[in-house]
Amino acid sequence: MGQLINATNFFIAKYSQDDDTIEYVYVVDEESSNSDSQQFFQTRKLSNHYSELVIRQQRTVLLSKEDMKHLYESGQTRKPTSNEHSWLGVPLKYSGELLGVMVIQSYTPQTSYNQEDAELLNFVSNHVSSAIKRRETSDIERQSHELLEQQVKLRTLALEEEIIQRKEVEKKLKHTASHDSLTGLPNRGVFVDLLNHAIACNKRKPELSFAILFLDLDRFKVVNDSLGHHAGDTLLKLIAHELLGILRNKDTVARLGGDEFVILIEDLDSDKEAFEIAKRITELLKEPFVINNQLVFTGTSIGILFSDERYDDADTMLRDADTAMYHAKDSGKGRYEVFDASMHQRVQNALTLEADIREAIEREEFVPYYQPILKLENEEIRGFEALARWPSDKRGFVFPDEFIPLAEETNLVQSIDFQIMKKSCQRT
């Protein structure tokens, strides 16, 4: 470079797109003994130096002292030092890939760079870029070769240890894939497999009876909303630990997700065993837990389902156990209920009724019935109360206690109210 151009102050910097940094790989500088200059040539993040102009624009940048001053005043670059007079930088590119920047600079007014210098520096940059790329390729090949030799040596010398480690990793992966990451309990997939196996055993040997307990925490959302999700996660882990302490070794507790747990109780001698476990769980969860030095109260509603020859798969059993749990929750929470066929029928009826209510709202089937408001002194009529009634085209006349509770639960009651108000106003 010194034979072609005044390169008393010259550096090459490589640019890393991965972490957006500049690394100075070659530096010749008159002020290299200066502490500020030494700090400047340390590997750094992109900022507001002149090299960044070349990198961001990917083109040659030629700056005079006035150009430097103008860039600083416009907020594009750092403040120039008093001894900076001329600056020339070109991008180092190879096959369209930006590798870095090559720069020459002058600290004296006697040396100023021009366009011819820029063309010359660009010419040299092509050779430098090729050399850098060859070096990188050579280093990668050398490192790959060394790594390959090392791997072969390790595999040759420690094959038995690697097999042991691989088995351990496989064991951990299987555990991770089959267990809940928060509580460490088996997940839904594992539980479904165990339940299907229990169903198959019960088909072959009916005396191998079992039961499912489907748990849902009663106040978990309150804990999450008031104390945060970290407290909620802590509560789930505490409850998982307590459930493991209550159950027998041959029983299985799993977390389905959220605040739902399921328990498989196998080899039942009598239904009483399942009731005793459910009672112990409900009593346990009535007691407060201490989280972040604060008492946290929760509870659980439990649905119980016993094995029966009519069940052929786990999903159906989980559905019915879930139905029993919701029945327990609707009956006052903090209790357990045993599934019977009428529960499923009630769920189906509720779903059908909800669909009919939505259809009736669309068809404006709800009508006001007026109940007089009397003055007690003389029984004079002072007004009327408009009551919602439903003469259904499909169901006939539906009594209010049949549809209003479900409408309130599904947030459909507001639409019914608006319909009654509208028809009442039209009537008056």
Image (spheres, rainbow, N blue to C red):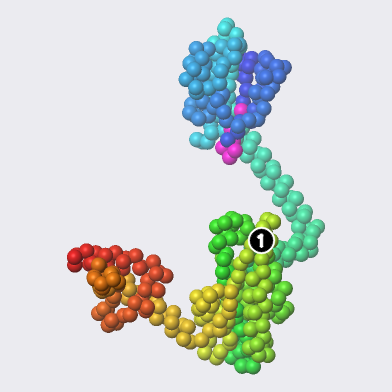
Quarter of the picture holding the C terminus: bottom left
Is residue 175 a member of the stretch shown in magenta?
no
> Of 269 and 368, which appears nearest the observer?
368
Judging by the rendered image, the residue that carries numbered circle 1 is 295
Range drawn in magenta: 13-19
Q: Is residue 255 left or right of residue 75?
A: right
**Looking at the image, which residue is at 39% across and 66% down?**
411
Q: Is residue 247 left or right of residue 157?
A: left
Q: Position of residue 349 (x, y in %)?
A: 39, 81
Above or below: residue 285 compared with residue 337:
above
Amino acid on which disc 1 is placed: Leu
**Looking at the image, which residue is at 62% across and 19% down?**
10
Q: Position of residue 388 (x, y in %)?
A: 30, 72
Above or below: residue 276 compared with residue 411:
below
Pointer 1: residues within 10 angstroms few (<14), some, or many (20+)?
few
> Of 51 and 336, which appears nearest the observer?
336
Q: Quadrant of residue 85?
A: top right
Q: Position of residue 77 (x, y in %)?
A: 53, 22
Q: Is residue 153 left or right of residue 5?
A: right
Secondary structure under the numbered disc 1 in the rendered image: strand
> Of 381 and 189, which appears nearest the observer?
381
* Residue 79 appears in view: yes
**Looking at the image, which residue is at 70% across and 63% down?**
169
